[in-house]
Image (spheres, rainbow, N blue to C red):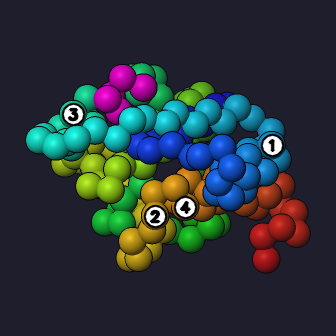
Amino acid sequence: MKIKIIAFGKFKNSQEYRQIFEYYKKRINFDIKLIELKSLLKPKKLEKEKDEIKKYINNNEYTFTMDSRGEKIDSESFSKLLFQTFSGGFKVINFVIGSEEGLDTEIRKSFKSISFGNFTWPHLLVRVMLIEQIYRALEIKKKSNYHK
């Protein structure tokens, strides 16, 4: 099993977000790859970013987009969704986090969108929240005490 997190912008080496991200990444027992894409400039920013995102998604992979307009799910539902996707024969799951402008309409409509609620979150923080939820999903599956 492999998860790719495709996101615009970069963690700075000393940034606390990176430290938290790495903490959870080390605790997850399968391959997590963070692909940090360079933010692009206008004009046609979202269209250019769409093309950049597509370079990292293969046909035999399942892709979710992280979007405030997406389906709002709780941690247990996220865990079920994650493991149902892997059980469905997909060996790679992608999570796409857009830039500060969001995601191109084609990207949003092409893949299942999930949301961390109606709030607008900093894009670097969404990475941390996502990897923690991936870890939590594993702990829910194991029925550990982590998720209460």
Give the class, few, some or many, for how many residues have Cα within 10 Å of label 2's Cα (few <14, many ≥20).
few
Disc 1 versus disc 4: nearer the observer: 4
Q: Residue 26's mark?
A: 1
Label 4 SS:
helix
Three-letter residue code for mark 1: Lys
Q: Marks 3 and 1: which is nearer the front?
A: 3
In this figure, which residue is indicated by the disc labeled 3? 48
Residue type at the position of mark 4: Leu
Toward the left, the furthest residue is 43
Mark pair 3, 1: CA separation: 33 Å
Q: Say which residue label 2 marks.
A: 122
Q: Is residue 112 visible?
A: no
Q: Is residue 67 left or right of residue 49?
A: right
- Magenta residues span 52-56
Element carrying mark 2: loop
Callout in the foreground (2, 1): 2
Mark 2 vs 4: CB contact within 8 A: yes
